[in-house]
Image: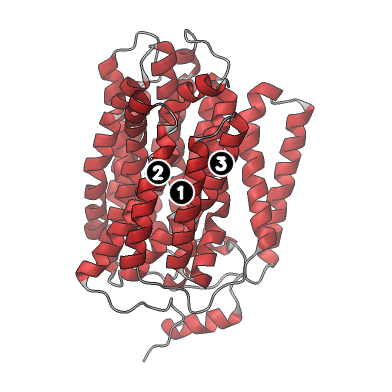
């Protein structure tokens, strides 16, 4: 008879109940994903409405992703401790209230601050939704399919954001992209209360506040330098001071995590090739996606003179590619493992980026649409295998933190993609923007090629094999190691 320290299971759910839980969590994740990209297509309109330029607009997007990325792991730990449904509902409430403030923001400062609070709420949704799904699906094959659906919905939401945003802005103005969140949040709160059971880890971890503070500092300093670098100068004294602070915060974070009994992020996890490459792969995919969305939006609206609606419609091929291929990727992961869909993802993203490395003012629209379709297909194939590989590399009792690390990687990638793309075209006029964006399309291709490396490191059938025996790192307490030894008697 086995004894475990796995998360306390909820009352057994029927198959219908399990997939209902997945549907409710997917709805909430769709909201988070859409809000990550819906603002992109509206940036020129927001800039005109509030009287700000490209650099300030980058903060409107990146403050959301940076705050979310920095808090995802601690939010996952809080959910494991206090209850995943409880934290999930708190996140929905915070997200909804912040959205209302964004909708009525009278100035750029208020909008950026409200977007930061939105990020706080969103950080309580992404990892917790995945933890709820993982705990509701005890069968490995069913869980692989469920993670595929979850990742598909999240990927689709990212691709659908610009289309939705363009339609809303054309009909109701840029503030409508925030108003639309209110009814979705209300519906999600009701559905979570009715259908999602409470769950938590049997033994909750302590909160690592020093590690959390240092991680936040590292992310904020890094992204801030990428955004402000073109303005202050990469070799200016201010920039050099930023580099020093970033290096010091990074070293402090590593030291704090290695010395902590229950760290925010057990750095020993990154010795596992499948986990480490999945996290890096998730970062690369979202660098590619967000670089594509920002460069495409600025090029079509500033250089080609397209409206927000037309610009949003131009991303329909990307959304179509993600919609068709994401569920297919989930099925492939469940049957064959992550390697094949990752190879497809890398090849399509690299091909899409290469299509636009010669972008100019007169580039044929069919070529642009073809490139976006290829990138969308690659994005659709990428999410399910990356998510499944990362989650499969961690014990079930850490489901909240497992989802948080993967989600953090995505949001870091999103922030870096926006910052790099914005830095490339900052100050470029409409006539020069296409040429200035070309290094960005090379970056997109490089991200696709990196996924081929990730595919090689991923196990060919990792989705259906039992997870590898867990060996606690320095951050694991002795009690947890003994408890897991009961699960793996061969230790």
Residue 457 horizontal/vertical position (percent):
40, 53
**Label tally:** 3
Task: Name the residue beneath numbered marker 1.
Answer: 96
Q: Are marks 1 and 3 in contact (CB under 8 Å)?
A: no
Q: Which mark is residue 181?
A: 2
Q: Are marks 2 and 1 in contact (CB under 8 Å)?
A: yes
CA gap between label 3 and label 2 equals 14 Å
Q: Is residue 330 visible?
A: yes
Residue 297 horizontal/vertical position (percent):
41, 23
For the residue carrying disc 1, how many other residues have a C-alpha within 10 Å: few (<14), some (14-19), or many (20+)? Answer: many
State which tag comes first along the sequence, 3 or 2: 3
Q: Are marks 3 and 2 in contact (CB under 8 Å)?
A: no
Residue name at image x 37 percent, y 22 percent: 308
Q: Nearer the viewer, residue 369 or 488?
A: 369
CA gap between label 2 and label 1 equals 6 Å
State which tag comes first along the sequence, 2 or 1: 1
Task: Name the residue beneath numbered marker 3.
Answer: 114
Residue name at image x 44 percent, y 61 percent: 89
């Amino acid at each position: 008879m086995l004894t475990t320290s796995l998360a306390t299971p909820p009352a057994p759910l029927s198959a219908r109940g399990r997939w209902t839980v997945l549907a409710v969590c997917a709805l909430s994740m769709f909201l988070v994903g859409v809000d990550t990209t819906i603002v992109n297509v509206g940036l020129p309109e927001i800039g005109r409405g509030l009287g700000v330029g490209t650099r300030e607009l980058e903060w409107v997007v990146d403050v959301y992703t940076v705050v979310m990325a920095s808090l995802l792991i601690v939010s996952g730990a809080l959910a494991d401790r206090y209850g995943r449904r409880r934290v999930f509902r708190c996140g929905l409430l915070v997200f909804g209230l912040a959205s209302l403030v964004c909708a009525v923001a009278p100035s750029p400062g208020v909008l950026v601050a409200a977007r930061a609070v939105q990020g706080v709420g969103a950080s309580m949704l992404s990892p917790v939704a995945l933890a709820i799904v993982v705990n509701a699906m005890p069968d490995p094959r069913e869980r692989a399919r469920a993670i595929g659906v979850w990742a598909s919905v999240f990927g689709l939401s990212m691709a659908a954001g610009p289309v939705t945003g363009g339609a809303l802005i054309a009909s109701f103005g840029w503030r409508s992209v925030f108003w639309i969140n209110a009814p979705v949040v209300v519906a999600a709160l009701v559905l979570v209360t009715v259908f999602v059971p409470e769950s938590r880890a049997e033994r909750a971890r302590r909160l690592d506040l020093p590690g959390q503070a240092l991680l936040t500092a590292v992310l904020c300093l890094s992204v801030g330098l990428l955004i402000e670098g073109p303005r202050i100068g990469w070799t200016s004294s201010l920039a050099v001071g930023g580099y020093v602070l970033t290096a010091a915060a990074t070293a402090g974070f590593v030291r704090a995590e290695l010395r902590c009994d229950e760290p925010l992020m057990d750095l020993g996890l990154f010795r596992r090739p499948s986990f480490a490459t999945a996290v890096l792969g998730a970062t690369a995919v979202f660098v590619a996606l967000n670089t594509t969305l920002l460069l495409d939006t600025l090029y079509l609206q500033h250089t080609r003179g397209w409206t927000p609606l037309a610009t949003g419609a131009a991303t329909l091929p990307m959304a179509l590619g993600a919609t068709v291929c994401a569920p297919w990727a989930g099925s492939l992961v469940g049957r064959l493992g992550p390697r094949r869909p990752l190879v497809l993802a890398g090849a399509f993203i690299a091909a899409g980026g290469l299509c636009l490395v010669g972008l100019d003012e007169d580039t044929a629209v069919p070529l642009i649409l073809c490139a976006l379709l290829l990138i969308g297909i690659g994005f659709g194939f990428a999410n399910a295998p990356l998510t499944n590989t990362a989650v499969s590399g961690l014990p079930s009792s850490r489901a909240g933190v497992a989802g948080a690390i993967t989600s953090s990687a995505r949001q870091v990638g999103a922030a870096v993609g926006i910052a790099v793309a914005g830095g490339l075209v900052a100050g470029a006029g409409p006539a020069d923007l296409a040429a200035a964006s070309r290094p960005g399309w090379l970056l997109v291709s490089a991200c696709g090629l990196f996924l081929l490396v990730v595919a090689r490191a991923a196990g060919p059938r990792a989705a259906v094999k039992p997870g590898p025996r867990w060996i606690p790192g320095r951050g694991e307490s002795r009690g947890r190691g003994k408890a897991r030894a009961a699960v793996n008697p061969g230790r």
